[in-house]
Amino acid sequence: MGEQPIFTTRAHVFQIDPNTKKNWVPASKQAVTVSYFYDVTRNSYRIISVDGAKVIINSTITPNMTFTKTSQKFGQWADSRANTVFGLGFSSEQQLTKFAEKFQEVKEAARLARDKSQEKIETSSNHSQESGCETPSSTQASSINGTDDEKASCAGPANTHLKSENNKLKIALTQSAANVKKWEIELQTLRESNARLTTALQDSVASVEQWKRQFSLCHDENDRLRNKIDELEEQCSEINREKEKNTQLKRRIEELELELREKETELTDLRKQSEIIPQLMSECEYVSEKLEAAEKDNQSLEDKVRSLKTDMEESKYRQRHLKVELKSFLEVLDGKIDDLHNFRRGLSKLGADN
């Protein structure tokens, strides 16, 4: 009932694993209220946090405690009385800063309260010693100047006062000895906590070094993968260029095939024209033989074209050779056509003469 809340915030509460002294164990499933309380009667400060009906933090602040920020949103302090280390995870860096500043203020207030209590003990002990020294002298003076009855009447209250002062001194000494023992136990506990924290810090440094090595390995692997990606992109660009070349070759082949069809159409027209004049066949056996020879040559040329076409389909890399053969074929065909035209002119002249 004598405690009053002086500061309140919300945070996730953790405690150090008592077995490993390294890992954090969550003490609350979600963010809970964490408050500073001031006890007026005892002149002490405590950090208290309750999750439902369970008290998860009950830490009395002493001047020897230290609150440490381990990250932007996490802080911790060691409690030697509870023999554990508490950790708080905040939602923002501002909340952590306010909590740390309040911890420092409360720690300073606890130190001042301890100093005042020590001053009171020293003052009371000094006062009791002075009163104990002055009382015998006063009684001695009275015994010198007074009678025996006066001596007896003055000695009784003085002895009673001395006894009460001695009892107070004994109680104060007993409390001081108990406080000394308690402080020695706290000091030993703090040393053990510092040793555990030092071990945890060394383990953390080793973990950081290991993470640095892993990061370096990941960085090297990333560089290697980037180089591999660059090589694959270069190969893809080469494949695209080859595809463009193949597309151009296909277009050229289609053009040549179109020209070949046109030549075949012209040959068909010539055959039809030769069939129109059957009456002249008997008079010009020589011409018909030449025509048959031309047809045979044409057939052989067609066979050559087919073979060239097959060769072009089988190997796209021999197109230059095919172009040369096609050009030669076209020249021969043009010559034959010229011969046929000349032959027609001869027939026309022959018909005119007849």
Image (spheres, grey):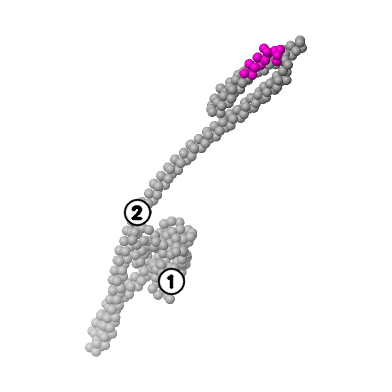
Q: Where is residue 247 in the image (x, y as percent from the top left)?
A: 58, 32
Asked if one can make out residue 146 in the rendered structure from this viewpoint, the answer is no
SS class, disc 2: helix
Counting other residues with Cα less than 10 Å from the Cα at mark 1, is it few (<14), some (14-19), or many (20 or more)? Answer: few
Counting the numbered discs, the total is 2
Q: In which quarter of the image is the N terminus?
A: bottom left
19 displayed left or right of 239: left
Residue at the (27%, 81%) spot, across then down: 163
Q: Give the range drawn in magenta.
A: 281-296
First in sequence: mark 1 or mark 2?
A: 1
142 displayed left or right of 310: left
Q: Where is residue 315 in the image (x, y as percent from the top left)?
A: 53, 27
Residue assigned mark 1: 53
Asked if one can make out residue 184 in the rendered structure from this viewpoint, the answer is yes
Q: Where is residue 148 in the image (x, y as percent from the top left)?
A: 22, 88
Q: Is the magenta stretch mostly helix, strand or loop?
A: helix
Residue at the (65%, 17%) spot, across then down: 292
Residue assigned mark 2: 202
Estimate the spatial distance between the alpha carbons at disc 1 and disc 2, rounded to whole Å: 37 Å
Specify the amino acid type for callout 1.
Ala
Q: Picture quarter containing residue 262?
A: top right
Residue at the (33%, 61%) spot, across then down: 19
Residue 69 included in the magenta stretch of the image: no
Disc sitting over residue 273 in the figure: none
